[in-house]
Amino acid sequence: MNKRVITVGIISIVVIGLAVFQLLKNKKKIAKEIYIHDTTTPILVEDGHADVHTFDSQFSFLGTFEPNRTNLIGSEGQGKILSINAQEGQLINQGATLLQLDNEMLQYQLENIDVSIEGQSKDVDRLSLLVQSESVPAVQLEKAKLALKSTQIQRKQVVKQLSGNILKTPFSGVVTKKLVDLGSVVGVGTPVFEITDISQLKLTVSVPERDIQNFVLDQQVSVKVDVFPGKIFSGKVSLIGIQADKMHNFKVQVLVSNTNNELRSGMYATASLVSSKSVTVLSVPRKALVGSTKNPAVYIIKNGKAMLTYFTAGTSDGDYIEVINGLTKDDRIILKGQVNLTAGSPVKTLK
């Protein structure tokens, strides 16, 4: 083999080896600089126990706001979209135009029908004179009148189609979804917009069997919203469920006016009312709550690890939440530090 070839080969191997060595060195250096959380290191938390708490005569029930109504609006006509007058997030009033479809062919069709109606009307007039003079049989006049009536009905159908090519919103609300774009071709019934009415919001709460008799339709209740501390909204009971769930809770909806649109769907709130009695029941501090009020949970400590545990909530007074089912007084509940936890995280408690 040529010595030159051997020399070039050796040099190539050396260069490749040096490159690999440098890459491995850089990899080790980068690995040292990257922080990797040690999942075996216990997280410091503060714990406590579920305990009995007395709720006074003003009972509060946790809930989440929902829109008063949400409507997925479909096209009433068919054709290409020529203009769109609403965008997502826009507040739009009842009767405002959402979009305009191409109606040129329908306009031509309407003009043609108008020409036919004009001609048929003249035929009816002429035949009326001829029937009076007994020049033609009356049956011809009847046929002409029926033909004119049929054409007039066709005109009404085309006018209806034309009106459907201009889509208007059925109620005031916020455009929460825009499902089409300019130039799209749609058919009758094609979903084009979602409109959400937040002028009023529904606060849905779950009321235990023992308290449901305290609610009546149209009853005024006080509503407090977590993001507006110290502010009280007025609500009215709009629905009382007639069927309890498996935990013997009843669905109650409270309608809250949202004149200034400061409230949002999904916000947490409590509905409060005055009762003639107080209740002492098992409860947990509200600060321990994890997740939504619809599906409340807390972290409890088992074998040195944090376990996410769901429970059924009842009455609340702002500081404590009643436990109807899912927890016992012996459970060690994490009160602080849960923001850093995931299910199964090792924990240690403050001494």
Image (cartoon, helix red, strand yellow):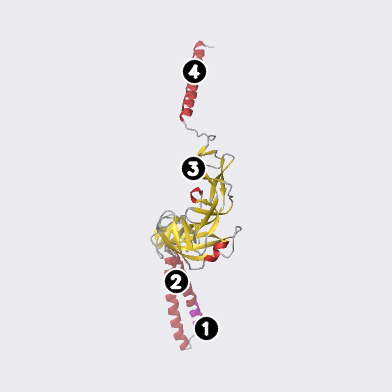
Q: Find disc 4 in the rendering and name its residue.
A: 12
Q: Find disc 2 in the rendering and name its residue.
A: 113
Give the spatial CA distance, label 1 vs label 3. 93 Å
Prevailing SS of the magenta stretch:
helix
Mark on residue 139? 1
Residue 142 lies within the magenta run: yes
Which amino acid, by three-letter code, is at mark 1?
Val
Residue 180 lies within the magenta run: no
Which amino acid, by three-letter code, is at mark 2?
Ile
Sequence-earlier tag: 2 or 4: 4
Expressed as whole percent of the image width and height from the top left, the position of residue 80 reads: 44, 58
Give the spatial CA distance, label 2 vs label 3. 76 Å
Which amino acid, by three-letter code, is at mark 4?
Ser
User: Which one is nearer the viewer's eye here, 234 or 84?
Assistant: 234
Which marked residue is nearer to the observer: mark 1 or mark 3? 3
Q: Find disc 3 in the rendering and name its residue.
A: 337
Q: Residue at x 44, y 82 (%)?
A: 126
Q: Residue at x 49, y 42 (%)?
A: 337
User: Which one is nearer the viewer's eye here, 50 or 263?
Assistant: 50
User: Quick check: 2 above or below 50?
Assistant: above
Q: Residue at x 47, y 86 (%)?
A: 131
Sequence-earlier tag: 4 or 3: 4
Question: Badge 1: how crowded within 10 Å, few (<14), some, or many (20+)?
Answer: few
Report helix, strand or loop for mark 2: helix
Q: Is residue 232 visible?
A: yes
Range of the magenta residues? Answer: 139-147
Give the spatial CA distance, label 2 vs label 1. 24 Å
Expressed as whole percent of the image width and height from the top left, the position of residue 72 reads: 49, 60
Question: Badge 3: how crowded within 10 Å, few (<14), some, or many (20+)?
Answer: some
Report helix, strand or loop for mark 4: helix
